Amino acid sequence: MNTQDIQMAISPSLAELVLEKLGFSHRPALTEHGLTQLYQGWCRNVPFDNIRKRIQVAQGIHAALPGSTPDDFLSHWLRFGTGGTCWAGHGALYALLKAAGFSVQFGLSTMRSPRPVSAGSPGHGTLFVRLEETLFIVDATMLHGQPLPLQA
């Protein structure tokens, strides 16, 4: 297990609670169908929002952004139904996919926007899941509902 995996890990009990709230009675199969079920559950139930971030900024709190760890993100989602923005959502989804046994990694991308992206700053994070020889994109911001296969 590498350093990133340790920092992004969630406990088996938290993973079970999240999977249960997403409608699973057991872990999804490590197949395209299982990945699709898990990602669809995420897309239908975990919002992309900035509610907690806005509250923190409005209160003038200078601390790590809400949801900056998978434990924080997922425990607040379980309790209050809140989500998070790009990096927070991807960290939480990464941790859940990893806990479920999927081979997942972070990716960087750029989203088309009329605003210029800061030099040296990635515009968007995403996740890649490898199933056999195919890489799939699952995105906690776009919430496209289906894992998207990458093709050459």
Image: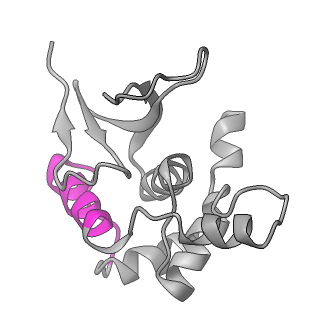
Q: Position of residue 66 (x, y in %)?
A: 67, 63
The N terminus, quarter of image: top right
- Residue drawn at point x = 67 percent, y = 57 percent: 69
Q: Is residue 69 visible?
A: yes
Span colored in magenta:
26-43
Q: Residue furthest bottom?
A: 79
Q: Give residue 47's quadrant in the image.
A: bottom left
Q: Position of residue 98 (x, y in %)?
A: 48, 50
Relative to residue 6, is residue 37 depicted above or below?
A: below
- In magenta segment, residue 30: yes
Q: Is residue 13 visible?
A: no
Relative to residue 128, is residue 51 depicted above or below?
A: below
Q: Give residue 10's quadrant in the image.
A: bottom right
Relative to residue 116, is residue 46 depicted above or below?
A: below
- Residue drawn at point x = 53 percent, y = 54 percent: 95
The C terminus, quarter of image: top left
Number of marks present in the image shown: 0
**Main secondary structure of the magenta stretch:** helix
- In magenta segment, residue 101: no
Q: Position of residue 44 (x, y in %)?
A: 25, 71
Q: Is residue 48 left or right of residue 88?
A: left
- Residue drawn at point x = 42 percent, y = 51 percent: 101
Q: Position of residue 111 (x, y in %)?
A: 34, 30
- Viewer-proximal residue among 47 and 33: 47
Q: Is residue 83 left or right of residue 37?
A: right
